[in-house]
Image (cartoon, rainbow, N blue to C red):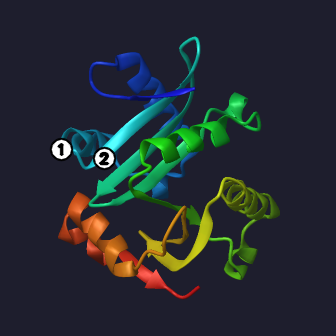
Amino acid sequence: MRLIQVDDTKEELSRQVKALYLDAFPKEERKPYQIMEQKQREGKMQIWAAIKEPEEFCGLAITILYKDMVLLDYFAICKGKRGMGIGSEVLGKLKEKYANFHLFLEIESTSEKIKMLSEEEQKIRRNRKRFYHQNGMKDTKLMVVLYGVSMEVLSFGREISFEEYLKLYIDTFGEKVADKIVCADR
C-alpha cells in the first residue's frame, strides 16, 4: 500500500479521489473540492490516494496542516474494499507519514443525542469510532459543532484545545470560518 499525493498532473487519480469523496461524505459535511485543491497548492492541505499494487485505487485521505498538527479531515475506503484491513493499513501509512506531527480527526457524534437517528446510522457511527479506537486513536475531551454537525475529536497523541483546533481552521480557511465552529459539551 502506498499513498500518492494527488495534484493536477494526476488526472485519473484526481477523478477517482473526487468521485469517492462525493460518494462517501454527506453534502453537509463536504467542503468544495476545488477549495481543497487550492489549499493544497498553498501548502495548507494534502490530498492523498491510497494505492494497492498494481495501481489499484483503494481510498482517499485529505489532511489539513497547521504548525505541528495534522487534521485527517476526510478518510474513506472504496465500498468494495471495506472490511479487508485496507483502512487500518492506510491509517498506519498516515501515522508514518505524519510521525512528527500531532495527528487527529473528527467523527460524527456517537453521544446519547444520536438516538433520533436511525438504528443503521447509529451503528455506522459506533463502528467508525470502534475502528479508530482499534487503530490506536483515543477520545479527547474536545467535542465541536462544525457547520451544524456535532463532531467528536479523536487523537493519536495529546489532547487538543478548542483554541488550537479553531486556529487550524482559521489559518486554513480564514476568519469567517470561526462563526461556523463552536465548542460543545461532551
> Which residue ends up furthest to the right in the rendered image?
119
Residue 167, labelled with which disc?
Answer: none
Residue bearing the label numbered 1: 42
The residue under the point 39% across, 79% down is 162
Q: Amino acid at mark 2?
A: Met
Give neighbour class at mark 2: few <14, some 14-19, many 20+ (Cα, 10 Å): many
- Per the model, the C-alpha gap separating discs 1 and 2 is 8 Å
> Which residue ends up furthest to the bottom in the rendered image?
185
The N terminus: image quadrant: top right
The x, y position of residue 146, in whole percent, is 43, 70
The x, y position of residue 157, in whole percent, is 51, 66
The C terminus: image quadrant: bottom right
Give neighbour class at mark 1: few <14, some 14-19, many 20+ (Cα, 10 Å): few
Q: Secondary structure at mark 2?
A: strand
Q: Amino acid at mark 1?
A: Glu
The x, y position of residue 25, in whole percent, is 54, 48
**Marks 1 and 2 close (CB-CB < 8 Å):** yes
Residue 98's place in the image compared with 68, above or below, is above
Q: Is residue 120 left or right of residue 63?
A: right
The residue under the point 38% across, 38% down is 47
How many numbered discs sit on the rendered protein? 2
Q: Is residue 166 left or right of residue 105?
A: left
> Which residue ends up furthest to the front in the rendered image?
100
The residue under the point 43% across, 22% down is 13
Q: Hey, which quadrant is residue 164 in on the image?
A: bottom left
Residue 165's place in the image compared with 17, above or below, is below
Q: Is residue 29 left or right of residue 90?
A: left
Residue 45, labelled with which disc?
Answer: 2
Q: Secondary structure at mark 1?
A: loop
The x, y position of residue 166, in whole percent, is 32, 73
